[in-house]
Image (cartoon, coloured by chain):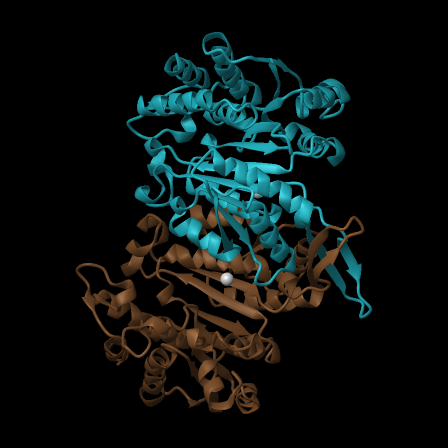
Chain colours: A cyan, B brown
Amino acid sequence: MTKKVLVLPGDGIGPEIVGQATRVLDALIENHGLDVTYESALVGGSSYDAHETPLTDEVLAQAKDADAILLGAVGGPKWEQYDISVRPEKALLKLRSELELFGNLRPAILYKQLADASSLKPELVSDLDVLIVRELTGGIYFGQPRGIRTLENGERQGYNTYVYSESEVERIAHVAFKAAMLRDKRVCSVDKANVLEATELWREVMDRVSKEYPEVELTHMYVDNAAMQLVRAPKQFDVMVTGNMFGDILSDCAAMLTGSIGMLPSASLDANGKGMYEPIHGSAPDIAGQNKANPLATILSVSMLLRHSFGEAELADKIDQAVSTVLDQGLRTADIHTDGDKLVSTTEMGDAVLAALA
Amino acid sequence: MTKKVLVLPGDGIGPEIVGQATRVLDALIENHGLDVTYESALVGGSSYDAHETPLTDEVLAQAKDADAILLGAVGGPKWEQYDISVRPEKALLKLRSELELFGNLRPAILYKQLADASSLKPELVSDLDVLIVRELTGGIYFGQPRGIRTLENGERQGYNTYVYSESEVERIAHVAFKAAMLRDKRVCSVDKANVLEATELWREVMDRVSKEYPEVELTHMYVDNAAMQLVRAPKQFDVMVTGNMFGDILSDCAAMLTGSIGMLPSASLDANGKGMYEPIHGSAPDIAGQNKANPLATILSVSMLLRHSFGEAELADKIDQAVSTVLDQGLRTADIHTDGDKLVSTTEMGDAVLAALA
Ligand SMILES: [Mg+2]
Ligand SMILES: [Mg+2]
């Protein structure tokens, strides 16, 4: 059956980078038998400008109806003057919660052609391919009770609650093990089970769910050690799975190991594998409309979409390979450009990826 | 007035490395006018073997009576069979809580002579000198309520409480600002104030206390960004201050950036600047008694002790300089040895530091 993708270009460089990603989709539909249709809609600041809300009910309904969502980026100084309830970022939070997108996939991949961009020694990160699976809708960022209260002695106290129920851990465990089945079949679960009871239960549930995936090797690591190991020898990992807060810290740390944020896609999945896919970089309003932005993270988001929501591993591999080919050709947008490379525009990079796909 | 140091060598390599550190103390007392006396006592497994407890009341009283404590390391497989209540590590927890050592100083320093040991490119970490100040006795690791409960729907839920009161934040803020006054006078406070109320109050108190230190520049950074910045450009920081859990993660991450855990000292301070000083590495039972261990982290712990508890910045600089001199001489214990260096034993390294001090 024909799958439906909702395309949400968003703000800033969003329309430019998504424009190149949909060219890739078009090519796969026309020449490689991909059975997909897509339609585009406004989100974020551009939606606010047209409808005074960053996410209309119509677009939310379209998102619910779609089989997957491809997002560019939202936000910019233009909308920072408005009330926080109608800021562009609110659209993403609403999409995540309404669609129950609790499974955040954050790859830290480094094409060997870009290994010099890392702050780590090239041999430690060249061809890095770690997938961090972060629980996105629970844990301490959402836990109740929370707030700032006044104690009997008159001083104030801030408090938050780190909380996970078994079912919350189970569903993110399945996301991690399923992702591992598409890769090297190794999951490292990160917790602080020696100190925090909330993560003691996390570890127990991970062990239990792992029995349903006998081919996957499960190990456990404390979060402080995980931060050390990511810095020391990141290539030791295949899939890492952890809660919302630890995942926030470790996925950003791992992304920075690659040295090129403009290359990294991400996914947020629901329990059925439906997902929203987007680059991890922002809307870069300073270079918007200048045909300078790097479209590769968005193009790689299409690859993730095909792999994780549509089961099209071969077409996903094709995209990944095309990106590698254009890097081999020495083509670089400004964000990843160094002496000796050929500086190209957003559309020139898109042209090159399409040529490499053909 | 003569200051008193309690020396607790502990287990494994503890007695060997502390033996070299006390030789340094002796030299400073005899030749450089340091007005200090010290006595030694058992702690950890060695205390258990003699008294069936890892920390006797007598030693605890000695610790309370001392002006500073120099610790080696505790633990080893020999004592893992015993009940958790009498394990060697319990001695450290009890010393910290009884002496209210809430202010953990974790330097991430990398002598330029060892820059190649880092996983980062040498120019990014050579001469690194970051001090991470971690709150050690509060936050989520100690917060109540905590546990695993059964919900009405029958599933279990794990929960912990991230909690800080104003007075707890105030006292760690003073530790950080005082430490910064001895350095480059810059403090970066790390929180997640955009999401966690407990750290919103943290940020507010940091701002308030900073007014008492007008010479010190205070900045704020979210914890996920801090993890990125440590990996990207660690030399941008002078002092970082953060809560117990974030400090656990970031201090270990920063330590690993140096590539040589065997070189790093630490301190745990009370509100009056009294402290316990120890290397961050463990008791290394596999090489205990073989005269192989690296004594430099313990010798640098003496430097920290003089600087932070006794106000002897000049003598502390002298020790730091002596360590740099022996590294210049190409002397390396096994843990930091590479081709072309001269491999030395624990005592030979101690000899060289003493010669450099003279
Ligand atoms: Mg983040
Ligand atoms: Mg730790």
Observer-nearest residue: B177 or B225?
B225
Question: Up-down: is A244 above or below A322?
Answer: below
Question: Up-down: is A37 above or below B193?
Answer: above
| Residue B313 visible at all | no
- What quarter of the picture does the N terminus of chain A occupy? top right
| Residue B267 visible at all | yes
Q: Is residue B2 left or right of residue B32?
A: right
- Which quadrant would residue A157 be assigned to in this image? bottom right
Question: Up-down: is B174 above or below B47?
Answer: above
Furthest residue in direction right, as rendered: A152
| Residue B229 coordinates in the image, percent (x, y) | 48, 47
| Residue A276 coordinates in the image, percent (x, y) | 61, 28
Report the residue at 39% width, 86% height from top: B34
Q: Is residue B112 left or right of residue A262?
A: left
**Location of ligand 1 given as a quarter of the image:** top right
- What quarter of the picture does the C terminus of chain A occupy? top left
Q: Is residue A6 left or right of residue B21?
A: right
| Residue A166 coordinates in the image, percent (x, y) | 67, 49
- Which quadrant would residue B25 be assigned to in this image? bottom left
| Residue B283 coordinates in the image, percent (x, y) | 40, 73
Furthest residue in direction left, as rendered: B340
Report the residue at 51% width, 83% height from top: B54
